[in-house]
């Protein structure tokens, strides 16, 4: 996390220090939501567990679970995310996969 904290505001740096669970806040204030999201990703062994804990903690309308989805997806990869966690995105996931594939093909071409 120290690399992610470089050059960031004091609030963001504090959020990335992994606060103890009893110091987490449901306020929705961006640095506090980030701190809670980072906590649940770091304290969990899977994407599903981190997401479920963040929703139980903050509720689905808070940004904490949104950040857990983004950070957890980066940590565990898209293949570790159950389809049921993506159903609310409609056709966005197939479109994103197609776009990512198209971009990756251009990168491979550029290397050769």
Image: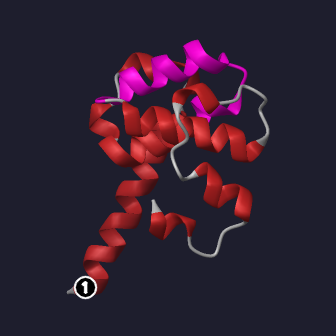
The foreground one among 17 and 95 is 17
Viewer-closest of 67 and 53: 53
Please tell me which residue lies in front, 68 or 97. Answer: 68
Q: Along the horizontal axis of the image, is 108 left or right of 29?
A: left
Task: Name the magenta segment's main secondary structure.
Answer: helix
Where in the figure is residue 29, as x and y percent of width and height? Answer: 79, 39
Q: Quadrant of residue 25?
A: top right
Please state the extent of the stretch shown in magenta in the rendering.
45-66
Quadrant assignment for the C terminus: bottom left
* Left or right: 40 as drawn, with respect to 29: left
Is any atom of residue 12 visible in this view?
Answer: yes
Q: Is residue 14 positioned above or below 28 on the image?
A: below
Residue drawn at x 72%, y 56% as measured from the top left: 11
x, y (%) of residue 73?
41, 41
The residue located at (69%, 33%) in the rendering is 63
Please tell me how many numbered marks the rendered image carries: 1
- Magenta segment: does it hold 54? yes
Quadrant showing the N terminus: bottom left
When the figure is inspected, residue 75 is found, relative to residue 92, above or below; the finding is below
Q: Residue at coordinates 39% horizontally, 61% vertically from top-left?
A: 102
Dot 1 corresponds to which residue?
111
Q: Position of residue 89 (x, y in %)?
A: 56, 27
Please say whether residue 43 is one of the residues in the magenta stretch: no
Residue at position x 46%, y 70% in the image: 3
Q: Is residue 60 above or below residue 5?
A: above
Of all residues, the one furthest to the top in this rendering is 56
* Residue 86 visible to an observer of this rendering: no
């Amino acid at each position: 996390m120290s690399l992610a904290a470089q050059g960031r505001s004091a609030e963001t740096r504090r959020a990335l220090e992994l606060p103890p669970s009893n110091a987490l806040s449901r306020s929705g204030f961006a640095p506090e939501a980030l701190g809670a999201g980072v906590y649940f990703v770091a304290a969990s062994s899977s994407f599903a567990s981190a997401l479920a804990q963040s929703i139980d903690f903050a509720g689905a309308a808070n940004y904490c679970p949104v950040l857990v989805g983004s950070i957890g997806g980066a940590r565990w990869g898209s293949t570790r995310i159950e389809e049921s966690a993506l159903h609310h995105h409609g056709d966005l996931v197939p479109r994103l996969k197609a776009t990512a594939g198209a971009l990756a093909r251009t990168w491979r071409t550029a290397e050769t």
